[in-house]
Image (spheres, grey):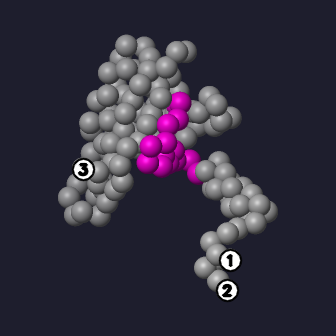
Amino acid sequence: MTANEDNSLSEKAKENLRKNAESRESNSKFIKLQPNEKRILKFNAEKIEQRETDFNGRGRKTMRYIYTVTEPNNGNQEKVLEVGKRTSQEIDSHLGEGRTLLMVQRFGLGLDTRYHIIPTAS
């Protein structure tokens, strides 16, 4: 097999991979954003939890904040967004002002991941 054959997929193969990705995403209860990906999420301020966990296996406990959200542009199925303290503060400031429809954008990878939270028009 040549390098060119190895790297080029048929349209059918690409479609199968896309369907698999969509299926995994729709069957998961967690919101998982890729770097630079943006999603509009509706937050339910009555469904927020806190959990202390060994985040990323670093051996020290950190507080994680778990928000129940829906994606208005993707079926409104309830899912979970788990974030750290800094992102939680940003989300909570918007929720405290009655803004529940927020655009969430992810920047970076691994421990350098940051989220940007922007209110959207309801």
* Residue found at the far right of this picture: 12
Residue displayed at 62% across by 28% down: 72
**Alpha carbon of mark 3 to alpha carbon of mark 2: how far?**
48 Å
Look at mark 1 in the image and give the residue it sits on.
5
Q: Which residues are magenta?
A: 27-41
Q: Residue at x 47, y 29 (%)?
A: 103
Amino acid under label 2? Met
Residue 79 in picture, x, y percent from top left: 55, 41
* Mark 3 vs mark 1, CA separation in Å: 46 Å
Q: Earlier in the sequence, mark 3 or mark 1?
A: 1
Q: Which residue is tagged 2?
A: 1
Q: Position of residue 4 (x, y in %)?
A: 64, 75
> Can residue 111 be seen from the camera position used here?
yes
* Amino acid bearing label 3: Thr
Q: Nearer the viewer, residue 66 or 115?
A: 115
Name the quarter where the C terminus is drawn.
Answer: top right
